[in-house]
Structure formats: C-alpha cells, structure tokens
C-alpha cells in the first residue's frame, strides 16, 4: 500500500498485482490445492458467481466474465451492489440474492473485504472460494475452510480453465509451442 505522497504505480492497471509496502514481509503459510485438485473443482462446477464484477471492459473481472460466458460451460452470475447489468446479464447485490447456490465464488475485491466475502460464501453454501490473481488472505481462507469450502488463492479462474482445456492461446497467452506449421481452424 502506498501513502498519499507516493503515486501508486498500478493505478489504472486492470491486472496488476498489489504493490506491498516496503516495510512489510508477508509470510504465506497456507498451502493451496494441487493442479489436479483445481482441475477437479473446475470440472465439477456448474456455476460461478463473480463477486466484484465490473461493467468496465478494462477491468480484469470483465475480461474473465467475457471468457467464462463464451468459452466455458458454466452458468455465470454477477455480484455487485452498484451495477444492474453486465454483458446483458442481471447483476445481484449479494451472494444471498442469487437464484442458485454457486459452486465457485470467484472474488475480485480488495483484501480487507475478503473475510466478509468468505463468510457470505459459507452462508450461502458455496463449494469453492476462489481468490483471483494477486489476492491472498489467510483469514478468508481459514473462514472458508472452516465452513467446508475448498479454497484457491492468487490464481485466475480464466487462466486455470484455459490452461486445463487448451485455450491459453485464445487470449494471447504464449502456449510455449514453436512451430512453422499454420494452426488449423475449424471452418
């Protein structure tokens, strides 16, 4: 976190990681699920609620929502008390207002809000609390796990889904494949 006299180098950057204060050393003691476990979560899920969804196309949550709606089998729900519609879909004020219990609660909120979102996810009976890339909150993880939820932190649900389903190249990610052969596309 920066003080008022120091400009935030990530201001306006949609996917930037938080800049830690110079005098803090965050110790990460929580251990996340394996790749196989994350794949299992994504394979069994039928619905994803995006908490902190934004109607701003420059925001990471909008990019993730666009991908999930177009390239995944999930029912996608948006949660943001200040917006009525995103990508033509109704937006709900809270997880409790959703018409279904979401399997995955994908969170795009500031660190201080994460324990509260974890409590909401437990209260509605979600199965997974998924904190997006750059989000790490061990208190939220402990709340969710105590409530029976699986937890993923500091990982992007879009990137993980695309990685497991061969779609990283769809968003301009380097697949690591070097080939002189033209990629064949379905016509």
Image (cartoon, grey):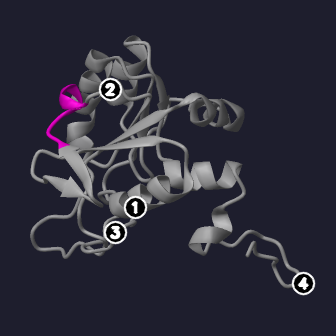
79 relative to 14, above or below: above
Tag of residue 181? 4
Q: Which numbered disc, 3 or 4, marks the residue that appears first in the sequence?
A: 3
Q: Nearer the viewer, mark 1 or mark 4?
A: 4
Q: Nearer the viewer, mark 2 or mark 4?
A: 2
For mark 1, does the 10 Å Cα neighbourhood hold few (<14), some (14 to 19), or many (20 or more) residues? few
Q: Nearer the viewer, residue 21 or 82?
A: 82
- The CA distance from mark 3 to mark 4 is 34 Å
2 and 4 marks in contact (CB < 8 Å) = no
Q: Which numbered disc, 3 or 2, marks the residue that appears first in the sequence?
A: 3
Reading the image, the residue beneath label 3 is: 14
Tell which residue pokes out farthest to the front in this image. Answer: 187
Q: Which residues are magenta?
A: 92-98
Reading the image, the residue beneath label 2 is: 100
Could you say which quadrant of the image residue 10 lies in?
Answer: bottom left
Tell me the residue at 31%/25% (across/down).
121
- The CA distance from mark 1 to mark 4 is 35 Å
Q: Which numbered disc, 1 or 4, marks the residue that appears first in the sequence?
A: 1
Reading the image, the residue beneath label 1 is: 17
Query: Was residue 55 drawn as part of the magenta stretch in this picture?
Result: no
Query: Was residue 96 drawn as part of the magenta stretch in this picture?
Result: yes
Question: On the rendered structure, is 37 left or right of 139?
Answer: right
């Amino acid at each position: 976190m920066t003080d008022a006299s120091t400009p935030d180098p990530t201001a306006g950057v949609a996917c930037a990681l938080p800049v830690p204060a110079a005098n803090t050393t965050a110790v990460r003691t929580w251990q996340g699920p394996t790749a196989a476990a994350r794949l299992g979560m994504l394979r069994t899920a039928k619905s994803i609620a995006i908490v902190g969804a934004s109607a701003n196309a420059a925001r990471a949550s909008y990019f993730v929502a666009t991908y999930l709606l177009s390239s995944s089998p999930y029912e996608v729900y948006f949660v943001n008390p200040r917006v009525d519609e995103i990508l033509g879909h109704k937006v709900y004020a809270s997880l409790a207002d959703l018409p279904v219990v979401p399997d995955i609660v994908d969170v795009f909120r500031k660190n201080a809000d994460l324990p509260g979102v974890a409590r909401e996810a437990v209260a509605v009976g979600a199965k997974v609390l998924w904190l997006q890339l750059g989000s790490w909150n061990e208190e939220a993880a402990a709340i969710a796990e105590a409530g029976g939820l699986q937890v993923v932190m500091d990982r992007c649900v879009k990137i993980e889904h695309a990685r497991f389903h061969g779609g990283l190249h769809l968003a301009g990610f380097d697949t690591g494949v070097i080939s002189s052969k033209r990629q064949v596309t379905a016509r």
